[in-house]
Amino acid sequence: MRTSQRAERIAPFYVMEVAKAALHKAREVAHTDRPVVFLNIGEPDFTAPSRVQQAAQSAISRGQTQYTAALGLDALRQAISDWYTQRFGIQVPASRIVVTAGASAALQLACLALIDRGDEILMPDPSYPCNRHFVSAAEGTAVLLPTTAEDRFQLSAAQVAAAWGSHTRGVLLASPSNPTGTSIDLGELARLVDVVRSHGGITLIDEIYLGLSHDGAFGQSALALGDDVISINSFSKYFNMTGWRLGWLVVPEALVPVIERLTQNLFICASAVAQQAALACFEPESLAEYERRRTEFKARRDYFIPALNALGLTVPVPPDGAFYAWADCTAACQKMGLKDSWDFAFAALEHAHVAITPGRDFGNDQAARFVRFSTANSMAELQTAIARLKTWLEP
C-alpha cells in the first residue's frame, strides 16, 4: 500500500527501539535479583492525587461524560488562568486559553494554524523529536541549530538573528527542555522574542515542564513577554496525569477562533472526564501535594547529577527543571571500547540492566556523545541504577 510523503518524512522514534529492547531484557531478568531499572521514559512515577481521582469518579457517576465546548470547560480555562496569576504573577485571560487533548494536540493545532508548506521553524539541537515532527506534519521544515553548554543548550537571540532567512516563519523552543532539563534565561528569551517580532515571526514555546522548575531565576513563563507569545502546556508532567491526555494552549485572542475551528474538526474536544478531574488539580490540597512532589523531584536531581559526574558521565549543564540528565558518555565509551551513545545505551542495558535513552532521537550535532537519563523514578531506583553503573564502569 502506498503511504503519503508526509508519513515518510516522519523519522522513527528511536527511543521506542530502546524501550522494546528494555522490555525484552526486563522479561529475561524479571525473576533475578537484578531487574531492569527504567530510566529511559520521561513519565513521573507519581499518579494523579486522590482528589483528582475522586473528581474523575464523581464525573463518571454524575454522567458528565459528554462533549464539552471545543475550547474546553469554562471553569477549567478560568482555573488555569488563576494558576498563572498565583504561581507566576502574570495575567493570562481565560479567553486566550484552549484546553486540548494533551500537549501533542496543542502543538499540532498551533502548527496547523500558523505554518504553511515551505515555512521554516528554527529549533535547538538537541530538542524533543516529536516537536519537530509536528512542524513536518504541517508541511513545514524544522531547522535544527546546534547549541552549546555555554548557552544552556538553548538558542540565543544572536543565533536566531543570524539564522533567520527568507523562509523562516518563527521559532519553537522548550523551557525547561527535554532532553537537557535546562531553561532559557528570561533576559535572553526576551531578546530572542524581540528578534522574532522584528521579522514578523511567531514564537512557540513548550512549557510542559515549567511547573517542575527548581530555580527561581528560570522558572518564569514566557507569556510574561507579551500576548503574541504562544505557550504549550500539559497536565502530564507537573500534574502527573500522563495517560489522561490533557493539555492546553495559550494564544493571542485573534487566534482563538482559528484554533477553535481546527479543534472542532480534528478533535471535537478534550476528554470530558479528564477535564472534570483536572479542576481538582487546582484545589489547595492537590497543589500542596504537587509542591511536595516537586521537592522530591529536586532531591532526586540533587543526588543523581553529582553521582553521574563521579562516574565520568558528565552533565555539562545542571538541569534547573524537568526530570532529565543530559550526560556526555564519551569518556565512558572510550573506556569500555564502545563506539557512541547508541552502543553505550544498549551496553548499559545488557551489563547493568539500566535502561537509558541515546542521543540519536534528539538531534544531529552531538547525538553520538550524549545519553538522556530520566530521574522521574524513585530515589531507591536511582540509587540502584548508580550502584549498577558503578560496578559496570569501575570493576
Image (cartoon, rainbow, N blue to C red):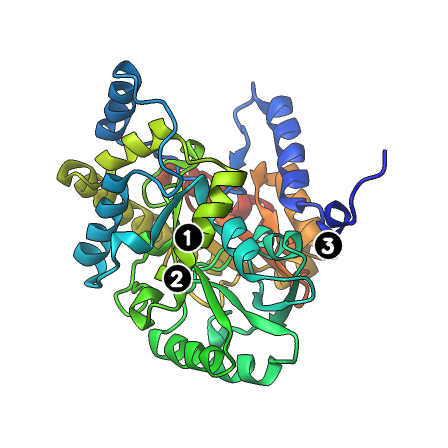
When the figure is inspected, residue 359 is found, relative to residue 4, above or below; the finding is below
Cβ atoms under marks 3 and 1 closer than 8 Å? no
Residue drawn at the location 45% of the way across and 51% of the way down: 259
Q: Quadrant of the N terminus?
A: top right
The residue that disc 1 covers is 257
Q: Which residue is mark 3?
A: 338
| Residues at discs 2 and 1 in contact (Cβ within 8 Å) | yes
Query: Marks 3/1: CA distance?
Result: 53 Å
Q: Position of residue 268 (x, y in %)?
A: 47, 35
User: Counting other residues with Cα less than 10 Å from the Cα at mark 3, is it few (<14), some (14-19), or many (20 or more)?
Assistant: some
**Secondary structure at numbered mark 3:** loop
3 or 2: mark nearer the eye:
2
Disc 3 marks which amino acid? Leu
Task: Classify 167 as above or below 49.
Answer: below
The residue drawn where x is 47% and y is 82% is 195
Query: In the picture shown, does residue 2 fall above or below 343?
Result: above
Q: Residue at x 73, y 49 (%)?
A: 6
Q: Secondary structure at mark 2?
A: helix
- Does residue 182 show up? yes
Q: 185 or 355, which is in the foreground? A: 185
Say which residue label 2 marks.
Answer: 254
Please state the horizontal and vertical placement of residue 133, each as a whole percent of the image: 63, 53
Kind of residue sitting beneath label 1: Pro
* Vertical placement of residue 325 versus 241, above or below: below
Q: Residue at x 36, y 29 (%)?
A: 272
Q: Earlier in the sequence, mark 3 or mark 2?
A: 2
Q: Quadrant of residue 28?
A: top right
Q: How many marks?
A: 3
Instruction: Mark 2: give few (<14), some (14-19) or many (20+) Cα within 10 Å.
Output: few
Please, what is the three-letter code of the amino acid marked with disc 2?
A: Ala
Q: Earlier in the sequence, mark 3 or mark 1?
A: 1
In-front residue for pair 78/32: 78
